[in-house]
Image (spheres, rainbow, N blue to C red):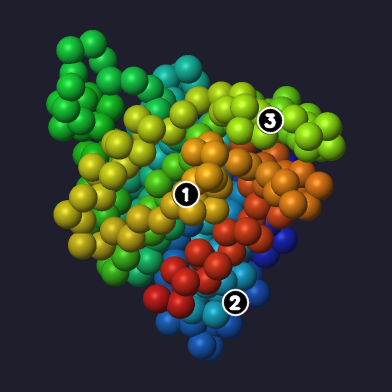
Amino acid sequence: MNTVVPTCKYDDGSGPFGRCNHTGLEEDKGKFKILIIGNSFAANHARLIHQECGSKARELVQISISACEPLYPAMKYGQRCVDTVEMFKKVVADEKPDYAFLTSRFLDIGDPFPAGVTRVEDDPIYKSMKKSFDVLVASVKFKIFVFMQIPEIVPSNIEKIVDVIKNKEDLAEFDKSFVQRNHTIARIRYEKMVQGCEKCVPFDYDSLFFNKTTSTWRFYDEANNGLSYMTTINHLSFHGLELVRHIFSNLCSSI
């Protein structure tokens, strides 16, 4: 699953979800309280954040809930995700972190605008997520780092990568078939949400996964025998995490 973090001391069993306090920090050097929040994508990235930001943290707290977005409830999962949104608002207000990472893969936030809605400002999903986000931002002292989304992939395509490259098939066409759900609408909502927010630091993986030559998203390394950057549950693989490591190194160096 690539979500269990060895440095996590989980409040409830062995994890990987719920709350945990990270161990292995340099408390005598670290000055800040850092909070990691999101769905399973947060747990997927937590090891990397610990490695890159751990020297800056006197306390590193992780809270992740599987299949629930922290800003807007995933309706197909019912009341559990409705409660999750309220939980995140309360938790961040209680924790009062110096810095926070909002690292969440989109679910309902990627849904199309309702009929008749042409401006993101009038979109009910955006207005709901913005209301939740403002509560989180108000509780963060310095900066909140916000992941700006990537497409959702077709999991079964991962096992096809090696053969496609070996057989010298059209990679651009394969790339197109790799995207199950585009992130465009989610990205529009996120971009509007952080606009004008002085505490917000958006980050994305566009330069790493979007192939400008083919104008497609490419989630594997064609030069390395098709090494996949993604797992079958839409997380970054260990290789994918290494690819994005420098982004977190830069973010953490700014703390």
According to the picture, the residue beneath numbered tag 1 turns out to be: 206
Which residue lies most toward the top here?
Answer: 115
Looking at the rendering, in which quadrant would you find the C terminus? Answer: bottom left
Residue 11 location (% of width, % of height): 60, 52
According to the picture, the residue beneath numbered tag 3 turns out to be: 170
Q: Earlier in the sequence, mark 3 or mark 1?
A: 3
The answer to whether residue 63 shows anywhere in this view is no
> Which residue: 47% across, 71% down?
250
**Badge 1 amino acid:** Asp
The reply to whether discs 2 and 3 touch (Cβ–Cβ < 8 Å) is no
- Give the quadrant of residue 40: top right
Residue 128 location (% of width, % of height): 25, 32
**Badge 3 amino acid:** Asp
Total numbered labels: 3
Q: Secondary structure at mark 2?
A: loop
**Badge 2 amino acid:** Leu
Q: Secondary structure at mark 1?
A: helix
> Which residue: 44% across, 69% down?
251
Q: Earlier in the sequence, mark 2 or mark 3?
A: 2
